[in-house]
Structure formats: structure tokens, C-alpha cells
């Protein structure tokens, strides 16, 4: 019995020392100390041992178990330590590696220009409002003094959804929607997307943006319009900018004008930028037509007002000296990154 125990001890210790994984240790524990393990089976055969011998043999079995258990624990600790060290070595962080760059987005030139325009008008007490891109013919044309058959309808090649509904060809319908909803005094700008059936080229696109302006109150005159747009032009293009009003025609304003600013590149002398004229056209404007006021239930005897419409892309192209509108729509990150 003593020899048998000695053999078991020897064999177990050898296997433990030779093992190199925690799982193997577990197998060894089961093989020797488990319910059906070798040492356990020795204990079971105790009945064959004489009564006098039993305590001694029991003690020996216990000693053997203790030795094997101690070796198992020791080896387990050693293997666990080794595994931890290997894991740490594998997960080591090289703090000298260059960091990954986070790419920060850029504002689109259109957005920068819009925020600049909004800042100027909000500073003069204007509210920023919006209207729908899918619009009724009534708001886009009819209520703006452009009845069916009016030649102005042909100038704006409009996308129709059906007889009554279209993609707005201008932001002017927001004038009407605003006057229907609120009473004077009104001071708003309305930026937004507009649509026209135009071929794409350096200066045209089927979808672009406008900023509409509208002021309605008692005693508003053309002088207010001139003063307002002069402040706007100077803020946007520089203090020495001059403004020129050329008579024009829009159905919803009377009188109407187109506004040019002195070229901010050559200061009016004439250059490639202003095509030699010294002036650059930037917007259309005028005094709100009495018919438009009446259609919005505002009494033209009591109230008057002015309106204007600016092309947002045109402002962005001028301000950043971009010579092709397509660049604003292609979303090439190498282009956008420059602003
Ligand atoms: N809606 C006009 C267009 O798209 C621009 C315009 C001109 C707007 C004169 C106005 C205005 O409010 O008074 O061509």
C-alpha cells in the first residue's frame, strides 16, 4: 500500500511538473483527486487494510493528497502568472506611435455665406423664417401678381407636380405666407432652396438657394430700401462698397430695381472679375406691389413695404472668388476643406 501511494505521488508530481496549461492541471486533479481518481480508489480499498493499519494508511493517503494538492496550487499560480505576463506583453501600448488624426468637418461655403447674411439682417432686427419647397402655384405665382398666362411665368422654367402644385422657383412665396399669418410691422428674411428646369453649367443649376427679404410697416419708402441694402452691401463686401440701383421690372414690386455693388476687387476701375464694368449685380428688389398687399389682406393705403431677393450661391461665389458654381454642389472634400 505504501509503495502504491509512493507510485501515485511520483506519477502525479511528474505529470504536474510537465504540464504547461491550466486545463491540463485540471485534468490531473480529476485523474488523481477526483471522485473516480486514483487516490480516491485507494481510500475505497481501505476495507482490505487491517483495522490496526488503517489510521496509518489513512494518514499516508492524506499526506499524499496534500503533497499533490500543494504542487497543483503552486503550478497553477506559476502558470497563471506566466499567462498574465504573456498577455501584458501582447497588449503593450507603444506610446511613441503617432496619434490617429480626427478629421473635423467644414462648413459649406453656402452655409458660411448664409450665416453672414443672417447675422447682418438679424442685427437690423429681422426674423429668419422658412417656407415649403413644394409649393402651391397660388403662392409661387398667383398671389405675387403673376396670373396664369403672365409672361413672367415663362422666364422661370418651373417644375410642376400637377396643375396646382410645383417646386417653388423663387423664395418670394414666403412673403405671401408671412403676410397671411402675421400683421405689420413685418421684418423677415427667408432663406431656402429653389428649383428651375435649367441645364447645369458654371452659373446655372436646377436647384439653388435664394434669400428673400420683406419689410412691411407704415410709411416705408424706397429710401428705407436703399438705406437697408447699402448697409447690407457694405457689411458683406467692405465699407468702401458703393451701391447702384438700376430700374428693372418684377411683377410683385413697383417700382422695381436691380442692385449692383462696386467691384470689391478693382474698386470700380474694371477688372476680369467684374468683366471690365466695375460693377457686379447682386440682387433684385422693389416696393411691394399694392396688388400683393391686397391679396394678403393688408391695406395698401395704410401700409407699404419693400422686398428683395438675393442668390445665395452668387454671394458665396463672389465672396470666395470661386468661378464655377458646380464646385458648390460636387462636395469634393479637397475643395470644401479650403473654407
Ligand atoms: N424672386 C425674384 C427672382 O427669383 C427675385 C426678387 C426680385 C425677389 C425682386 C424680390 C424682389 O423680393 O423684390 O428672380
Image (cartoon, rainbow, N blue to C red):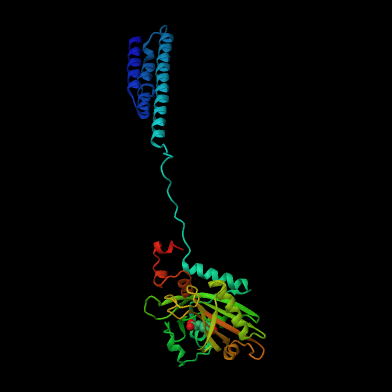
| Residue displayed at 34% across by 16% down | 8
Q: Is residue 170 visible?
A: yes
Where's residue 109, x and y in %?
47, 67
Q: Nearer the viewer, residue 251 or 336?
A: 336
Q: Residue furthest top?
A: 52
* Quadrant of the rendering where the N terminus is positioned: top left
**In the rendered view, would you say 97 is above or below 134?**
above
- Which quadrant would residue 50 be assigned to in this image? top left
Where's residue 257, x and y in %?
53, 86
Where's residue 3, x and y in %?
33, 10
| Residue displayed at 37% across by 10% down | 49
| Residue displayed at 38% across by 27% down | 26
Q: Nearer the viewer, residue 220 or 168?
A: 220
Q: Nearer the viewer, residue 57 or 18?
A: 18
Tell whether 80 sits left or right of 114.
left
Q: Nearer the viewer, residue 71 or 256?
A: 256
- Which quadrant would residue 321 be assigned to in this image? bottom left
Q: Is residue 117 visible?
A: no
Question: What is the tally of numbered marks visible in this picture?
Answer: 0
Where's residue 75, x and y in %?
39, 23
Q: Residue furthest bottom?
A: 149
**In the rendered view, would you say 210 is above or below 67?**
below
Amino acid at each position: 500500500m505504501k509503495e502504491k501511494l509512493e507510485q501515485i505521488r511520483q506519477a502525479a508530481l511528474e505529470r504536474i511538473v510537465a504540464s504547461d496549461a491550466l486545463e491540463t492541471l485540471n485534468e490531473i486533479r480529476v485523474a488523481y483527486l477526483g471522485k473516480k481518481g486514483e487516490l480516491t480508489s485507494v481510500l475505497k480499498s481501505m476495507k482490505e487494510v487491517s483495522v490496526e493499519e488503517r489510521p496509518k494508511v489513512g494518514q499516508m493517503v492524506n499526506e499524499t493528497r496534500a503533497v499533490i494538492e500543494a504542487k497543483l496550487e503552486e503550478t497553477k499560480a506559476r502558470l497563471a502568472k506566466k499567462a498574465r505576463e504573456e498577455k501584458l506583453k501582447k497588449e503593450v501600448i507603444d506610446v511613441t506611435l503617432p496619434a490617429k488624426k480626427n478629421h473635423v468637418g467644414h462648413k459649406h461655403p453656402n452655409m458660411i455665406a448664409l450665416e453672414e447674411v443672417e447675422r447682418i439682417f438679424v442685427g437690423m432686427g429681422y426674423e429668419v423664417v422658412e417656407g415649403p419647397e413644394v409649393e402651391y402655384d397660388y403662392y409661387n405665382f398667383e398671389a405675387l401678381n403673376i396670373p396664369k398666362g403672365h409672361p413672367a411665368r415663362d422666364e422661370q422654367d418651373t417644375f410642376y407636380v400637377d396643375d396646382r402644385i410645383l417646386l417653388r422657383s423663387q423664395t418670394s412665396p414666403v412673403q405671401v405666407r408671412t403676410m397671411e399669418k402675421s400683421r405689420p410691422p413685418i421684418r423677415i428674411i427667408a432663406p431656402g432652396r429653389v428649383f428651375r428646369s435649367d441645364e447645369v453649367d458654371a452659373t446655372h443649376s436646377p436647384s439653388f438657394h435664394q434669400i428673400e427679404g420683406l419689410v412691411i410697416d407704415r410709411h416705408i419708402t424706397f429710401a428705407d430700401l436703399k438705406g437697408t441694402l447699402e448697409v447690407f452691401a457694405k457689411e458683406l463686401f467692405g465699407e468702401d462698397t458703393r451701391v447702384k440701383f438700376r430700374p428693372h421690372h418684377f411683377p410683385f414690386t413697383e417700382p422695381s430695381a436691380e442692385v449692383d455693388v462696386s467691384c470689391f476687387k478693382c474698386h470700380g476701375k474694371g477688372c476680369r472679375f467684374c468683366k471690365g464694368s466695375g460693377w457686379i449685380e447682386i440682387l433684385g428688389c422693389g416696393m411691394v406691389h399694392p396688388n400683393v398687399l391686397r391679396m394678403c389682406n393688408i391695406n395698401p393705403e395704410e401700409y407699404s413695404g419693400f422686398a428683395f431677393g438675393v442668390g445665395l450661391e452668387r454671394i458665396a461665389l463672389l465672396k470666395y472668388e470661386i468661378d464655377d458654381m458646380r464646385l458648390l454642389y460636387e462636395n469634393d472634400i479637397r475643395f470644401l476643406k479650403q473654407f
